[in-house]
Image (spheres, grey):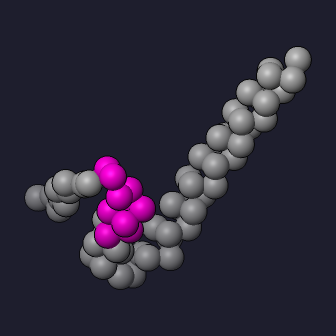
Amino acid sequence: MTHTLQVEMDLNKPVEELTQVITAVLSSHPLNQIEILAALDLKIGNALAALEIQKQKEKAEVTE
């Protein structure tokens, strides 16, 4: 048996839609909310850092 959540998202409202998905997942794991949010925080932080590095590389290429 597996527990699944099928989601249909309006990609024109990504923050609102993702927030609803995260809220749904958290509500199904009340004892693991901190761990889930910490893992998401790490993933989001890594993604932001990668985007910042890419932005700096592109900026450096333009100024060369």
Q: In which quarter of the image is residue 57?
A: top right
Q: Which of 29 and 11 is in front in this view?
A: 11
Farthest residue, direction right: 64
Q: Nearer the viewer, residue 29 or 5?
A: 5
Q: Where is residue 62 in the image (x, y as percent from the top left)?
A: 80, 22
The answer to whether residue 29 is visible is no
Task: Write the start and end of the magenta stretch as one range.
Answer: 11-20
**Up-down relation of residue 59 to residue 8 (above or below):** above
Residue displayed at 74% across by 27% down? 58
Give the left or right position of residue 55, taking residue 13 as reference.
Answer: right
Q: Where is residue 4 in the image (x, y as percent from the top left)?
A: 18, 58
Quarter of the image that includes the N terminus: bottom left
Give the left or right position of residue 31, taking residue 39 as reference.
Answer: left
Q: Position of residue 59 (x, y in %)?
A: 79, 30
**Up-down relation of residue 20 to residue 50 (above or below):** below
Residue displayed at 30% across by 79% down? 27
Residue displayed at 51% across by 60% down? 40
Q: Is residue 5 magenta?
A: no
**Up-down relation of residue 60 to residue 38 (above or below):** above
Please tell me whether the stretch drawn in magenta is mainly helix, strand or loop. Answer: helix
Q: Which of 6 and 63 is in front in this view?
A: 63
Q: Nearer the viewer, residue 5 or 15?
A: 15
Residue displayed at 31% across by 50% down? 11
Q: Position of residue 23 (x, y in %)?
A: 34, 74
**Up-down relation of residue 50 to residue 59 (above or below):** below
Quarter of the image that includes the C terminus: top right
Farthest residue, direction top: 64
